Amino acid sequence: MPDSPPSVVNHLPRARLRMRRWLMASGFYWVGLPFAVYGWQHGQLAGVAVALFALLAIGANLCFYLLIATGRSARLREPSMTAPQILVAMLCCLMLVAGASDPLRPTISLGLLGPLLFGVFQLDPRGFVRLALLGLSGYGLVLLLIAATRGIAQPVVDLTHWLGLALILTVFVAICSEVTRMRQRQQLLLAQLQESADRDPLTGLYNRRWLARQLPPAIELAQRHHRPYSVCMVDIDHFKPINDRLGHLAGDAALQWVSRQMQQALRQTDALVRVGGEEFLLLLPETSLAGATELAERICESLAHNRFLAAADATPLQITLSIGVAPLLATDNSDHLLFRADTALYAAKQQGRNRVVSA
């Protein structure tokens, strides 16, 4: 996510989603704190444990809120900070476990499951296992410290409860793995659908949908860093007679042939878009007007030395192109740039076709 001032970040969809997740996570503390105070008042929780719980809960949640609200969390590898929030919640729970009476301790230890249940839908299995083992081992360590300091009235009950937690966490790990697999399959399917929606089914080239999403940020980036950027509007000359004389199947094959010829002249950083029936658009980053014009002329020469065969026994057909070239100006947006390229293409047609004209 690009850097933005705090007043803007709070209005971004992802920032709002992170804030909602933080509110859901912080509810763990606002529900737990009144119960902790109630347990302290009735002698079931140590005052020190309740005070440490309150300090850590308030301090950590305030830090999480500031990171999200100012947009600084967007710079982290995991902007929602799911793992740190789960870790803080488990530490708070273990503090209360350490200060709880023997009858209350098993009940409070169930609080370890809440944060981990939230992590089932956010974390990868490896990260979830680490947190689950940390919570389980932390609970075991607390039990050992209690046994060493003040003793445990019913150690068998606590041990059985610890083993039960271990079994539940094992089930959580299995659920987390399955949720992760489902999420990965969904992401793959969405990527495939996006790729299919962005491609022209006939030529396999990018289409207008892809162009509308990709061109504006590419232009903005080139202008911001003062880098050259050019586009070429391409039209197949006299394409309608090809369709009328040879049929639409031959016309489709001609479109595919021309697109392959143009693609062979492009770099990996360039892009070729089919914007209309027989119209194409070349996007040329890091390319000046002179470089774009040279490329366009090279494409025209390549087609001049090749012939299109509609069928194995058909007569080779000469196909020519009219190309309008436009460099990016400091005042351009995507519409202005494409308009100037289209104007240059119109000039190429007016001047007799089979030529390159610069805006």
Image (cartoon, helix red, strand yellow):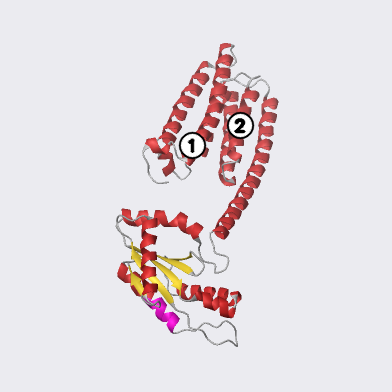
Which image quadrant is residue 339 in? bottom left
**Above or below, comparing residue 301 to residue 3 in the picture:** below
Measured in 3D between alpha carbons, the distance from the residue under mark 2 to the one under mark 1, in whole angstroms, is 23 Å
- The residue depicted at 51 percent of the width and 66 percent of the height is 205
- The residue depicted at 52 percent of the width and 74 percent of the height is 240
Q: Is residue 270 visible?
A: no
Task: First in sequence, mark 2 or 1: give its number.
Answer: 1
What stretch of residues is rendered in magenta? 297-304
Q: Quadrant for the C terminus, please.
A: bottom left
Residue 142 within the segment the image draws in magenta: no
Residue placed under numbered mark 1 in the picture: 16
Image depth: mark 2 or mark 1 in front: 1
Residue 302 within the segment the image draws in magenta: yes
- The residue depicted at 52 percent of the width and 16 percent of the height is 47
The main secondary structure of the magenta stretch is helix
Circle 1 sits in a helix, a strand or a loop, which is it? Answer: helix
Q: Inspect the image, locate mark 1, and give the three-letter code of the amino acid beneath it.
A: Arg
Q: Residues within 10 Å of mark 2 (few under 14, many from 20)?
A: some
Q: Inspect the image, locate mark 2, and give the three-letter code of the amino acid beneath it.
A: Gly
Image coordinates of residue 167 in percent, x first then y, are: 69, 37
Image coordinates of residue 220 in percent, x first then y, are: 36, 53
**Viewer-side residue, 228 vs 239:** 239
**Above or below, comparing residue 25 to residue 330 in the picture:** above
Which image quadrant is residue 352 in? bottom left
- The residue depicted at 56 percent of the width and 18 percent of the height is 34
The numbered mark at residue 114 is: 2
**Viewer-side residue, 2 vs 111:** 2
